[in-house]
Image (spheres, helix red, strand yellow):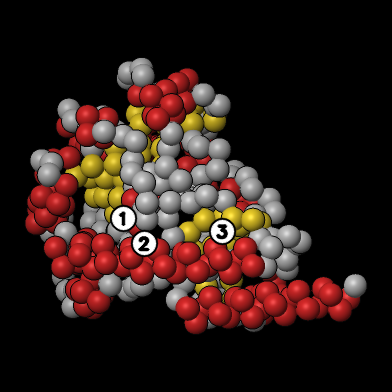
Amino acid sequence: MTARFHGGPDAQGVARWDFSSNANACGPCPMALQAVQRADAVHYPDPAYTRLRAALADLHGVAPWRVLLAASASECVQRLTAWRWRLGDRRFWTPQHAYGDYAHAASAWGLERVNDPGQAPLVWLCDPGSPLGQGESAEVVRAALNHTPRTVVLDRAYAPLRLRGHSVLDAAQLDRVWQLWSPNKALGLTGVRAAYAIAPLGAHADVAELDALAASWPIGAHGEAMLLAWTTSEVQDWVAASRHTLADWAGALRAMLAAHGWTCAPSDTAYGCARPPRTIEAAALREQGIKLRDATSFGLPGWWRLSAQRPETLAALDAALCALETNVETSE
């Protein structure tokens, strides 16, 4: 069974200076937070989520039947994998460095990873992905979509936080894939679990099957409130404005790491991977209230994933790295 590793809080609680989560550091989005705080937790949500489906469909310019609701993106990954296993799929493909829940779900259901996306009936794409913050190449997309039938899922969790570039998938290609969205990251509200997917054109029966595999009321009142807020122009404008701030913070992070001798991998987002000039002790940083995301579980040993953070948080990491370097020089 593939182990699951995630950034964010751990057994020690929330780190004071947390670079390990990819959540929007400008958040939480005030309007979305207020919507969550005002949510009616006394009553069940509408079991059909009629209003929510209509609002999400309007946001994406699709028919409401194409909206598949999920308790979270991770839950949707599990459900999509289970669905494909029931239909006979036994192979899958993911990018070499990717979110671990794709492989974990496949391992749980007995699917084997193959090296060629053209040979896998279930393909996971990322736009952009984690940990590197880069989009899929046109070559991989062509290989994934070159043959049918095939189930291709495009994880767009970080698309709202893309700082440069654009997706290589055109509108016609997007209509052929499942687009998985989890806005809690862009809104800085990762503790609120709710997500959705936009189904491909013509996938009416598939949506019905996947809805049948879900529990009743997969999204609670607070998740429903967050997703409804996500569909409003005010919240979309806030996310767009936050990207300008994140771009400045990301530039400052990379400059600071470079000054300490770290190698920074290219990224189109506010997070990315960097490799220090010498081994660092994550536990020593954690004791100082600083948490980074070890990228070993992504297949990148020696690298760390860091997200852009506020200036005071960056200053804390800068000081901690200076202290570690001083200790190394003293010991030598």
Horizontal arrangement in the rendering, residue 318 relative to residue 228 (left or right): right
Name the quadrant of the N terminus: top right
| Cα separation between marks 1 and 3 | 19 Å
Quadrant position of residue 211:
top left
Q: Give coordinates of residue 157: x percent, y percent.
A: 36, 52
Which residue is painted at 26% across and 62% down in the image? 240
Please rate how many residues cluster around mark 1, counting C-alpha atoms within 10 Å: few if below 14, some from 14 to 19, many from 20. many
Q: Earlier in the sequence, mark 3 or mark 2?
A: 2
Q: Give coordinates of residue 257: x percent, y percent.
A: 61, 66
Q: Mark 1 falls on what kind of element?
A: helix
Which residue is painted at 55% across and 43% down in the image? 97
Q: Nearer the viewer, mark 1 or mark 2?
A: 1
Q: Is residue 294 above or below residue 171?
A: below
Provide the residue designation for mark 3. Answer: 305
Provide the residue designation for mark 1. Answer: 160
Q: Label 2 near label 1: C-beta < 8 Å? A: yes
Provide the residue designation for mark 2. Answer: 185
Q: Earlier in the sequence, mark 1 or mark 2?
A: 1
Q: Mark 2 falls on what kind of element?
A: loop
What's under tag 1, amino acid-wise? Pro
Q: Nearer the viewer, mark 3 or mark 2?
A: 3
